[in-house]
Amino acid sequence: MQLRFNAISELGEPGAKFKKLFDSYWPGYNSWLTTKGAVSVPDLATSQAALRKYMPEMLPTYEKLCNLVNADAVAAQFLTGFQPPAYISACSQAVLVEKEVQLVRNYDYHPDLFEGTLLLSSWNGKKVMATSDCLIGAVDGMNESGLAISLTFGGRKVVGEGFGIPFILRYVLEFCDTTEEAVAALTRIPSHMAYNVTVVDRSGVFKTVLLSPDRTPLVTEAAFTTNHQIHVDWPENATFNKSMERSEFLSDLLAQKGLDAKTLADAFLRKPLYNTLFSEGFETLFTSVYQPVAGTMQLRWPNESMFQSFDNFTESHKLVQFGESAKELEQSDTLMNTPSETSRVTPQESLTCSTLERFYLN
């Protein structure tokens, strides 16, 4: 199995490159909404009102993007980020601020549900490098002010009223400069599922905010998170993704005297943090390493890497192989991981029913 990771730069007004991304990915998202969200997704007016209430600064960008892609009512609702269908990732993350300021995280998810895009943009006058999700959203990223942010799934089944977490992270990167500002946004904007969000600025100030739709956001000094919050709420999920094992590993690692940024980042490419459940479609798709002071970041894999910076961002692509021989890779006809109508919505063809519960909540 292989994935193509694309680094794309489009500074200034969103234009042809974003539209190309939308045209490639929207059919898959549209089908996903049709099969998973027909009952729970609110109407366009309600969704736009929520965006206007909680993230009013995003409205001009939202309207520009809708006009750019000629969004119909379904697409326009989706791009608000309000109340998307529930879905589950895993992930591990940790922050180090003693000698260097660094945020590192693994993104553990099904490969068919991943856009594979690192986008450099400046929709609101601030450069943002972010790993894209849900077209507008981000699962991790950093802005040119030196604010870095990432998420892990919070390990709870509860779904409530709020925004998809990638849209919230995008808002933080677009409009916040410091950890204090980011925390204010994270505790104000409702998340429709449980997530752990770690944010750090270039001064080294960091916080981890535990979000849940049925609980008041909890702001903590935690330097790492995996896939539970105060305690394990969903034992089956925590057992499957080894949330406690990864948490204990990170706790011990960060407690080591003299731990440096490279050692921490390298640890994310090894077990128990690096996930290789290829047969179950649930693996570490990339490791991201953010250096807020330098304004640089890396996407890393065991045998590959992609380095980018605000000062020297290079458009590129990289084919990364997962659990399959080079010969099989050469014989493969699929060179792009474009989320098609089947890839985002019907993983039933490759996953068992029990595995599906790990990705979607009804």
Image (cartoon, helix red, strand yellow):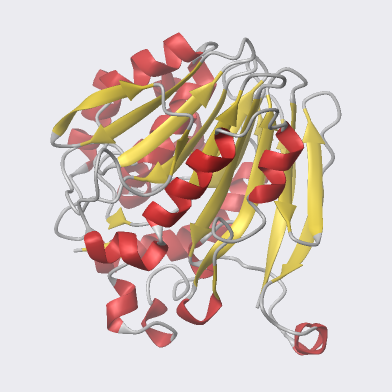
Q: Examine the rendering and report whether any part of residue 56 can be seen.
A: no
> Where on the picture, by quarter, is residue 128?
top right
Percent x, y for residue 237?
A: 30, 63
Q: 94 and 356: which one is in front?
A: 94
The image quadrant where one finds the C terminus is bottom left
Q: Residue furthest front?
A: 257
> Where on the picture, by quarter, is residue 53?
top left
As drawn, 163 above or below 6 = above
Give left or right: position of 207 versus 353.
right
Percent x, y for residue 106?
A: 57, 50
Task: Residue at 56%, 56% (x, y): give it.
Answer: 23
Percent x, y for residue 97?
A: 62, 20
Give left or right: position of 269 versus 85.
right
Percent x, y for residue 150?
A: 50, 36
Q: Examine the rendering and report whether any part of residue 14 can be seen.
A: yes
As drawn, 238 above or below 169 = below
Give left or right: position of 39 versus 19.
left
Task: Residue at 24%, 29% (x, y): give it.
Answer: 190
The image quadrant where one finds the N terminus is bottom right
